[in-house]
Image (cartoon, rainbow, N blue to C red):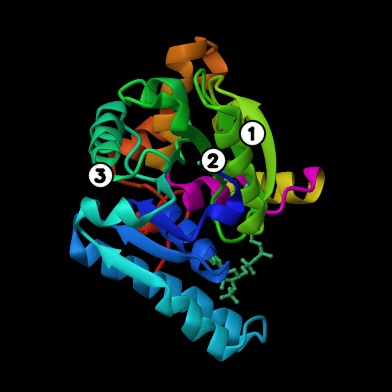
Amino acid sequence: MTEGGIRTVGVVGLGAMGAGIAQLAIEAGFATIGHELDADAGEAARVRITHFLARKVDKGQLAAEARDAALDRLRLSSDLSELAACEVVIEAAFEDLAVKHELFRALEAVVPDETILATNTSALSVTEIASVLELPERAVGMHFFNPAPLMPLVEIVRAERTAAPVAAAARAFGIALGKTPIDCSDTPGFVVNRVLIPLLNDCVRVLDEAGITPEDLDAGMKLGAGWPMGPCTLLDLVGVDVHVHASDALYDKLREPRMAPPARLVRMFKAGKLGRKSGEGFYRYD
Ligand code: CAA
């Protein structure tokens, strides 16, 4: 299947990443079904998407009619069987292998054989996720970056059994969403997280080793290394829980000490200081 064959897109899980991916899909002209078990969480995603599209209208980046048409393309559902209408489904659910297995089994039971099942996992193995499918060749990784509507990259992850036309279709679909795809294999952390996760862990270790403040570390990496935002601001954006989980998953696989989450981040995680989403991380948010 080529991207030209995709008309309806499913997104399972409408947290920050899923909502961002759904926003991309409706802006790119695809009818989009966003699946959330909890109707309130689904509505919260719609509010979030509406807010960001409204900002684009305010700033003259999007016509009001185009915004309205995009929002009309978004349908929310808490019934997985409605995804039977989709040519591609992107799973952006909680990063837990058992959760993803259950979802992939349930999805395969309702979608046609030709439907591509993509996962936005950032630290789990796509091959392992796909292992519960009758047709594992239909599975592929499409790894977007946070915030999904703004970050231009998508990693197209070929699992052990991904069919070449499925990877090619995912790549073309990524381009249709306005992203620049890179092709990679199903190795731990793929490309960017393999490098970025230990780097962010080093940044947090430096905080304690050098006895500096998050503000100064952020200023250091922005002004001295050209980062668009400092590491503490970035961790607050990504979510300390998401980062600790991804670090643990990579450490499990690679056993490199730098992959393990630093004690300071684990303490923050346990205290519920998760960053923007909880109102406090390295910084406070109102
Ligand atoms: N979704 C949709 N739109 C958003 C958004 C979001 N989450 N966040 C912001 N926007 C919109 C807003 O409307 C905003 O405009 P207003 O503030 O006027 O409302 C608009 O985007 C532009 O935002 P900014 O002015 O903040 O844009 P910027 O030019 O400062 O760039 C940035 C923001 C692209 C995030 C930039 O700071 C950047 O590149 N930061 C680094 C991010 C990064 O490294 N991400 C990777 C994280 S790692 C990861 O994702 C891997 C993983 O698996 C966890």
* Residue found 19% across the figure and 64% down from its top: 39
Rendering quarter of residue 93: top left
Q: Is residue 233 magenta?
A: yes
Q: Mark 3 packing: few (<14 Cα in 10 Å), some, or many (20+)?
A: some
Q: Which residue is mark 1?
A: 192
Q: Which residue is mark 3?
A: 110
Q: Mark 1 packing: few (<14 Cα in 10 Å), some, or many (20+)?
A: few
| Tag 2 secondary structure | strand
Rendering quarter of residue 16: bottom left
Q: Disc 1 marks which amino acid?
A: Val
Mark nearer the N terminus (2 vs 3): 3
Of 119 and 256, the residue lying toward us: 119
Determine which of the numbered discs, if any, sits on residue 92 in the image. Answer: none
Q: Look at the image and tell me whether residue 188 can be seen.
A: yes
Q: Quadrant of the C terminus?
A: bottom left
| Tag 1 secondary structure | helix
Q: Which residue is mark 2?
A: 143
Q: Quadrant of the N terminus?
A: top right
Mark nearer the N terminus (1 vs 2): 2
Q: Disc 2 marks which amino acid?
A: His
- Residue 162 position within the rendered picture, expressed as x and y whole percent measured from the top left: 52, 26
Image position of 171 (left or right of 114): right
